[in-house]
Amino acid sequence: MGDKLGDAIGPALRRSFDDTPVHLKGVPRVINRLTDKKSRDRDGVHEVDRYDGSNHDVSRSPNPNHPGRDQGGRYNGDGSKPWDDKQALGVEKYAKEANVEVITTEVHVVFDGSPQPWRTYDGLIRNADGPNTYDGLEIKSGNAAARYFSETPSNTQGAFDRAVLAGTPARGKMDGMDILVTNVIVRVVP
């Protein structure tokens, strides 16, 4: 008997919950559409509205002024990296201002006891410290600049560069030749 009563009450309870609008405090209405269902008869056809999973949030559409971000300023996963443009412009500006050639070949460098497995710089500039010695050029923009200059344990790039600046050269290979990075130049771009 309990099963028959449960079978009769279950659908009635389910209907009452399905017809109850869900309003979650602090959650945008678009999320609430996940649970909203409304049924109606239109021209003799019974229809049920359900959230179809499509994104109706306009702020998620691509931002034409900022590739790689949506209208809300979030990364949209289209493969563009907005910081790449700033990095390239920063490298170009430094090369022009310092009247030097900046090598942009990606080279992994490391030293014993390094706070991270390896480090790459945005550019390398040959210096006069000895044969095959270079300055590492690092371009920072936006929040990355503030994080880089903090001395928190998670800032391994900054810790790596402070060690190089304190006299610990970083070793690597470029075009099959051993190189040393003995200095770091940091430029912040807007």
Image: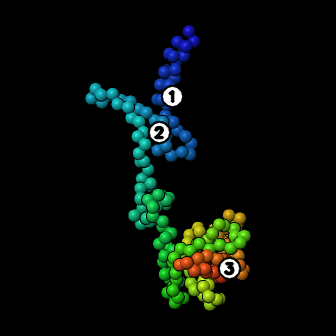
Question: Mark 1 belongs to which amino acid?
Answer: Phe
Give the SS element for disc 2. Answer: loop
Q: CA distance from mark 3 to mark 2?
A: 56 Å
Give the SS element for disc 3. Answer: loop
Label 3 or label 1, whichever comes before in sequence order: 1
Give the x, y percent position of residue 130.
64, 89
Name the residue beneath numbered marker 3: 169
Label 2 or label 1, whichever comes before in sequence order: 1
Question: Mark 3 belongs to which amino acid?
Answer: Pro
Question: Mark 2 belongs to which amino acid?
Answer: Leu
Which mark is in front, 2 or 1?
2
Which mark is in front, 3 or 1?
3
Label 3 or label 2, whichever comes before in sequence order: 2
- As drawn, is 72 to the left or to the right of 111? left
Give the x, y percent position of residue 17.
51, 28
Q: What residue is rendered at 49% in x and 20% in y?
A: 12
Toward the front, the furthest residue is 176
The quarter of the image holding the N terminus is: top right
Residue 34 is tagged as 2
Front-most of residues 28 and 140:
140
Front-most of residues 62 and 93:
93
Location of residue 99 with respect to 62 vertically, above or below: below
Name the residue beneath numbered marker 1: 17
Give the x, y percent position of residue 104.
51, 78
Q: What residue is rendered at 42% in x and 61% in y?
A: 63
Residue 67 placement: quadrant: bottom left
Could you classify mark 2 by the number of other residues whose Cα lies within 10 Å: few (under 14), some (14-19), or many (20 or more)? Answer: few
* CB contact under 8 Å: marks 3 and 1: no
Q: Is residue 40 visible?
A: yes
Give the SS element for disc 1. Answer: helix
Which mark is in front, 3 or 2?
3
